[in-house]
Amino acid sequence: MALYSEKVMDHFTNPRNVGEMENADGIGEVGNAKCGDIMKIYLKIDNNIITDVKFNTFGCGSAIASSSMATEMIKGKSVDEALELTNKAVVEALDGLPPHKIHCSVLAEEAVKAALKDYYDKNNIPYNKDLFPDCDGCAHCADH
Ligand code: FES
């Protein structure tokens, strides 16, 4: 069996929604303490709906594929729906990642969450802090 699925290779070689965004409504940047890779996600949000998503990463191929898939999965969704995105769902949508690459998909999930938190903060929207375990410095990834 190939190490990477066709979907991973597709999203790695032809990533969707790459770039930056002016006047983003939410920006999330997270880093993986172990590998040093960085992920940045930009959201455009109108009436609680994510109308556009862009991402930039200094990350590995799995991080690129994961964030490309994650942006496709949250585009057009409500903020609440996007908050439910898990790295597990991203990995499933990619038809799997090798075990030692799962943490790369965590980077995508955390960047989406950080961007949504930024949107809440900028607009003074109250939220349940439990939704955003502190990922500054990527303490979560440091466990890998
Ligand atoms: Fe760092 Fe994949 S090895 S994100």
Image (spheres, rainbow, N blue to C red):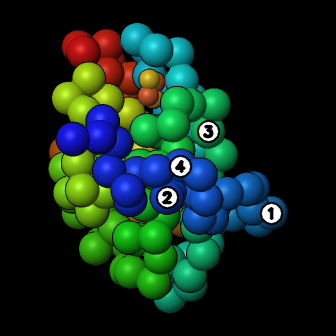
Residue type, label 3: Thr
The residue that label 3 is drawn on is 57
Q: Confirm or reject: label 3 Cβ below 8 Å from ligand 1.
A: yes
Disc 1 from disc 2: Cα separation: 27 Å
Residue type, label 2: Asp
Is 58 or 84 nearer to us in this picture? 58
Residue mark closest to the camera, 3 vs 1 = 3
Q: Confirm or reject: label 1 Cβ below 8 Å from ligand 1.
A: no
Q: Residue at x 45, y 84 (%)?
A: 76
Looking at the rendering, in which quadrant would you find the C terminus? Answer: top left
Q: Are marks 1 and 4 in contact (CB under 8 Å)?
A: no
Residue mark closest to the camera, 4 vs 3 = 4
Helix, strand or loop under label 1: loop
The residue that label 1 is drawn on is 22
The residue that label 4 is drawn on is 12
Q: Where is residue 48 in the image (x, y as percent from the top left)?
A: 45, 82
Q: Can residue 69 be seen in this view?
A: yes
Disc marking residue 122: none
Residue mark closest to the camera, 3 vs 2 = 2
Q: Position of residue 67 (x, y in %)?
A: 47, 51
Is 30 or 68 nearer to us in this picture? 68
The residue that label 2 is drawn on is 10
User: Tag 2 or tag 3, which sits nearer the N-term?
Assistant: 2
User: Tag 2 or tag 1, which sits nearer the N-term?
Assistant: 2
Helix, strand or loop under label 3: strand
Disc 3 from disc 1: Cα separation: 17 Å
User: Tag 4 or tag 1, which sits nearer the N-term?
Assistant: 4
Does 86 sit above or below residue 78? above
